[in-house]
Amino acid sequence: MSSSLTPFFKPRGVVVIGASTSPEKLGYGVARNLIQSRYKGAVHFVSQKSGTLFDRPLYTNLNDVPDPVDLAILIVPTQVTPQTIEDCAKRGIKAAIIVSAGFREVGAEGAALEQQCVDVARKHGGAFAAAIIDCARGEGFGFSQIVSLGNQADVNETDVLPEVAKDEHTRVIVLYMESVSDGAKFVHAASEVTKHKPVIALKVGRFEAGQKAAASHTGALAGSEAAFDAAFAKAGILRADTAEQMFDWARALEDCPLPRGKRMAILTNAGGPGVIAADSLETNGLLLSQLTESTLRALSSYLPPSSSVHNPVDMLASASPESYATCLKILLQDENVDGVLVILPPPPMFKTENVAEKVIEVIGNFDKPVVVALMGSTLVEEANKVFQRAHVPTYPFPERAASALGALAKRAEYLNGLQHLPTLELNKSKSEVRRLRTPEELIASYGITTTPIKLARDENEAVTIANELGFPVVMKIASPDILHKSDIGGVLLNIKSAEEALSGYATLLERAKKAMPLARIEGVHVQRQIPEGQEVIVGAVRDPLFGPLIMFGSGGIEVEGLKDVAFALAPLNQTEAQEMIRKTWAGRKLKGFRSIPPVDEESVIDVLVKLSLLAYEHPEVDEIEINPLRVLQKGAVAVDVRVRLRA
Amino acid sequence: MSSSLTPFFKPRGVVVIGASTSPEKLGYGVARNLIQSRYKGAVHFVSQKSGTLFDRPLYTNLNDVPDPVDLAILIVPTQVTPQTIEDCAKRGIKAAIIVSAGFREVGAEGAALEQQCVDVARKHGGAFAAAIIDCARGEGFGFSQIVSLGNQADVNETDVLPEVAKDEHTRVIVLYMESVSDGAKFVHAASEVTKHKPVIALKVGRFEAGQKAAASHTGALAGSEAAFDAAFAKAGILRADTAEQMFDWARALEDCPLPRGKRMAILTNAGGPGVIAADSLETNGLLLSQLTESTLRALSSYLPPSSSVHNPVDMLASASPESYATCLKILLQDENVDGVLVILPPPPMFKTENVAEKVIEVIGNFDKPVVVALMGSTLVEEANKVFQRAHVPTYPFPERAASALGALAKRAEYLNGLQHLPTLELNKSKSEVRRLRTPEELIASYGITTTPIKLARDENEAVTIANELGFPVVMKIASPDILHKSDIGGVLLNIKSAEEALSGYATLLERAKKAMPLARIEGVHVQRQIPEGQEVIVGAVRDPLFGPLIMFGSGGIEVEGLKDVAFALAPLNQTEAQEMIRKTWAGRKLKGFRSIPPVDEESVIDVLVKLSLLAYEHPEVDEIEINPLRVLQKGAVAVDVRVRLRA
């Protein structure tokens, strides 16, 4: 454990500075909670008045406090806080938690904990932490550590996360976040943690960020929320929508084995909740398992004829504890079933807790997740306790049980994806952006195909350029005086050979001279003719927290309106790029749709990976956007590129 | 009350046919529940063996059962069910509920209830109903009636809904639906009910409908879910996403006054849940109220300096019961505040129930909704009871409290909208579709502008047609032998006057003759030239349950991919049409976006209303689609129309 954080997580002794004997004072509450917390180290109190508190002396001078003491909890007026910290330092105390009211923002708070949670948080988030501990107690699970970081003046989430993860008693980590101190570091640290332990985040403050000025569609669409989503995805963190969901998921992730796939079975004694559960499985990205023939036969021969043996398996209200156990066993034995959602409203003829006992015996024999929708209140109280003791997660409604199964499947998918992740080759030889004259040159230096327009000053140069660009080319008269080139026949399409380029040059000059004898002619612009294809947008914008954020989606001028875009953090590997593509209609369409012919999806993946590398390796690029990128039958060409460099 | 349903809702006597003395039999459970249900009418039992059950005789013959008896509950084998029903009819029993297992589908079940709920449902949905009753009990509210309709062989939701609504003890109606028997009737009946009482529906079976063959984009996109959404919107029914949400909303709608607007205040003693609540308000379509200056002054002078007086108002963890009451009062007095979300985790220094008591005193003095996020478990148990007794809805997490406030605001908005709903004029003189030759004629008969192509056989006819269509027109040579008309100069754009039409006719004939002397010339096609504009799709498809469903959105060929569409049930009024437009990007764009100039939104509303009338008045039209409808600076023109009539 890193030495500077040790006193926070494993203090040998704690002193409460500002302890009080008045029960309505904060200094009393903190002292009481620390005593009640089962913290096993030394606890000391410092107060303005001498005396005793909880059978311990009240010291009036910090220097009188005996060893060991390496963590101070400060409940002192704001004005004297700096002096008190200095006093602590002089006394050799390495860590301090400031609990004082009197700072305008959310004040610094914290907790010194080992094995059992200590509720020292007494302000702002503090009451929240107390409610969370109480709530968890009600649901039969506990926290090994609760770390409330306050204003993070000194210690932030990136420092703490790996330390928390090291704790053998911590099996699941839940994060409540309003922001992040160092996004890139956080993603890196979290990625390491999630390889071994599940992390769930509740990120709040979604609607607080105002609109910012942006030079591109990518910049306009990439808000802080998109960045957090991308960061959580990159780090393998499961993002919960609500606090309740965070805890629902945490219980499943703590207690259940991970499923091998997404095919789930539903076992119920009532039709309605079975249908609800089936809907919810799909909402949560899961599939209703197709039971094997032998499972259907086994269920048919066991259940009464009016039951439904097809998934959702409805045993009818007459189902006994034995029916639940037998059918659950049959389902868990099915190779097509990756997990089971058991629905258990109070059975009319039996005690719910008896069903619980029978079901638990079965669950223990399989390495597949089983979650229970235990519906009701007083009639299922006893059953709930039975399940809690056996570490089988229960939820009051099928939707929440399905959501928990969904979290398990997402976790499994993430760990599975880690095993065959292609490695990303970072470009060793960075090009210096500022030395490159145009956006086209910049993206071309990363191997992205562009369509440069080049000026030919004579017919031989036209041929050279056309050869260089590759046929077919487009040729346009180059003159500052001729605005509507097509009108005078000043544009030649589909020039296929050197000969055609040679004669084309002459043709254009002749037509221009004839139509506008006084126009200044600079020569002829030559450009590779881009075949028909599909057009998409590809962009990158530097998020202030997480660095370059890559966007892909439907291009054109209506990007912000259609919002058919996906985001991911740079650098991207092929798999990540492909996932972005699949998330959007523009991406799915690449494979063709009705009269729209299929185009080269691989080339888009390639451009995404390359652009992400470019953005990752060039911190001076604030925004870069290719709109459109024309995707052809073979290859993709950047038709228009814009870059904004950091000021 | 309609006479045929009276026995179900107000039976004078009930007979259980198939009652049993064996506790593990269904016939025993139903009898027991009926006895325990506090149902005040007569209860009789019929069984194969004579004897007694619950101090009542067991009759072996239905004819021996004494009066009064007007409802029978059948727990008999499937095979003898028809005979038993006949026996009932002979005995003068007007209503029967079939509980027998042995029907393959969800069996018919039911309940005869008055004032207190009777749980007779013993099969499928029955266990679900039991769980719901138990769950409600745990949350401190009850059901005045629970009606489980089983397979609805005789009585369906449309018959029952108005009856349930008439009950003075029923303040909120919740519906669990898997389908609907007669969609149009249901929408009509529900619309009447929701004017007086809130109705919340949980519609399940979302993912069951397979793909169906469709002749249009509208048909392909309009699934059963879109139809149910549209039907619920039309009927003023609030649609809940989950069972938990349905009950969360029901409690708020039962206990709270409706808000006048959407501006909500948050009162908290902890920062984190305050931020969560603020996010959740916005997620649920509500606004974080801007507190008035005088409110801010009042809060500032009352609260300690480190509190946050801006919404969310954070009193800090030291907040006392008096702080909660005083600040809540200040907030409810604010004219900018339409409702308050109180966040109450266990305060460190006070008992949560004391806060509850103080807060309740304040709530009673205002006609604004207040919901409480009461966070925790054992520490808030007592407070929860206090709130329940006072009919103040509590929720364990801020997100759920915010969702309940959102439901209140939606209900208020709906009732408000009812007051100034424009009346819809149904077309009295229906045109006979089959007599109209073309889709263009059909929509034109409803006043929707089309672009008919007409053939002029000579130059005078060309002038007549052009005058009729209105200038400018496009003229094209009409010949079965000339495929590429533009190539021979066979198309004239922007013909602005009769003179130009006259000479145009001659020009086209001359050019055709010169280019292709042998081509057969039929004359010249004249078509109104449609100016540039925005293109949208407008369609209608006959939903098998609810009738014509109108679609609006982004047109073209990618309709199904972009899915930028909205649905509503016909007939539409202007307000409903406008709402559809606002829901889509295609609609919002009508007002202009960046370089896209604004177009005539009113004309789109007009087309939507007219098309909805057309579909409503012509049951023989299965699908009709205008794609694209070109919306101009003034007016809108149907460029392409397709119709599919019922086979």
Image: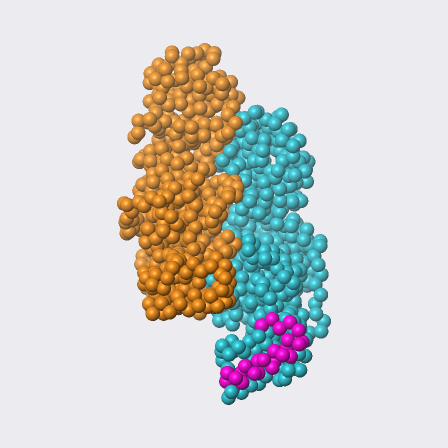
Chain colours: A orange, B cyan
Q: Residue at x 45, y 53 (%)?
A: A565
Between A208 and A383, the one nearer to me in the picture: A208
Q: Quadrant of the C terminus of chain A?
A: top left
Looking at the image, which is closer to me, A355 or B515?
Answer: B515
- Residue A629 placed where, x, y %? 41, 57
Along the viewing direction, whichever of A338 and A77 lies nearer the viewer: A77
Is residue A6 among what the camera can see?
yes
- For residue B185, side relative to residue A405 (left or right): right
- Locate the N terminus of chain A and report the quarter of the image it occupies: top left
User: Is B514 colored magenta in this rendering?
Assistant: yes
The residue depicted at 48 percent of the width and 68 percent of the height is: A514
Which is nearer the eye, B96 or B512?
B512
Q: Position of residue B31 (x, y in %)?
A: 54, 55
Instruction: Name the residue at 57% across, 85% down.
Output: B522
The image shows residue B307, relative to residue B502, as above or below, that is: above
**Magenta-colored span:** B493-516
Instruction: Examine the rendered structure and indicate whether residue A310 appears above or below residue A42.
Output: below
Q: Is residue B463 above or below residue A203?
A: below
A57 magenta-colored: no
